[in-house]
Image: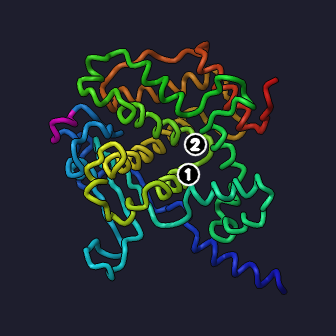
Amino acid sequence: MKTLRFFPLLYLFIIACDQPDFNKHAGACPAASGASDDTTGAPTYKTVRGALLGTRFTSFEALKSVIRIEYGNGAITSDSTAPENTIVRVRHCSSGREVISILEKGIHEGNFLKAFNAKRSGEHWKNLYLLFRCPYAVMNRDKLDKIHTLSRWKPEWFGEGDLAFFDLAKSSVARINTPDLAFKNPRDSTEKGYLNSFNHITAQAFITTCFSEELADFVADTHERYRHPELITGKFTKEQIADLAEGPVDNYVDIVNNEWGQELGKQLKKKYNINDETNWTPELLANYLNDLLSYYSWAFQIGFEPYDPEDEEVLRFSGKLDAVMKGRLYIQR
């Protein structure tokens, strides 16, 4: 009888948990033709399609001329007694395609860090918080562990010089072979330029391809909620709005690029028929990375030197990716 009483309780917690939103979608822009492109009207942004470059925007207002930000569950007001927004929808329409990101209040990256530290210290009972607050995370614990490994340097497992998603993004920037086109805006060469955009798209594409769009969305949302809860409420200070590198401009661009990365990841998953049994050979990884470069070339209208299966970063990351996905983690000696 205790078990029978437990399941309805667990069901309530599942409903209350911040699950990935299955209502978000990508499709044709409302009342738009395939040839339309909302970015062509902005003089500083006319050479970019699809994915965004945060360094092309000089203000929050400039960004809002390209994307739509819709807050819900209470209007933003100076009245301290007014209900606070608990959800934000970010829409971006480009070249006749629309992506929508939905971010709600809920569990965040900090909760996972506490659970990880509790596990290391032997205080496993503290992890019950995650079970009851968000069973989705617990049910996908093994997959989240794999994502964490691919997102971090693990030299103790894969040797000195181990690579992560960030290194693939950095390598892609280094392969730009049309500097006159790519770096007309000096800010594009900074960490918040191509590198930041490539990093978000690369990581979200791989997570979507190797796991699912829902899990990629979950990972992205837990990160954004932890670092910048104001993205949901819309209550930014003047200082935050003016901070182009770390404020709402940078972070809403990241949210949009996460969505484009997921769309790309779904296409590549289908193209290469990738599943849990896929052998991530250097040839497959080189082809996958070159498809990412092709997208960047189309989106930003710049050129790249392609990846080769014999490239060092391809050899190293293909070995790591194959080992992680198949559970063959080992320590280099």
SS class of the residue under badge 1? Answer: helix
Q: Is residue 279 visible?
A: no
Tell whether label 2 touches label 1 (CB within 8 Å).
yes
Is 28 positioned to the left or the right of 122 in the image?
left
- Name the residue tied to disc 1: 219
Prevailing secondary structure of the magenta residues: helix
- Spot occupied by residue 318 in the image (x, y as percentages of width and height): 65, 26
Q: What residue is drawn where x is 30% and y is 59%?
A: 69
Magenta residues span 41-46
Front residue of 94/219: it is 219
**Mark 2 packing: few (<14 Cα in 10 Å), some, or many (20+)?**
many
Residue 43 is covered by the magenta coloring: yes
Report the Cα–Cα distance between label 1 and label 2.
Answer: 9 Å
Residue pointed to by mark 2:
207
Amino acid type, label 2: Ile
Q: Quadrant of the N terminus?
A: bottom right
The quadrant where residue 178 appears: top left
Q: Residue 139: image x %, image y %?
A: 70, 59
For label 1, count other residues whose C-alpha is less than 10 Å away and answer few (under 14), some (14-19) or many (20+): many
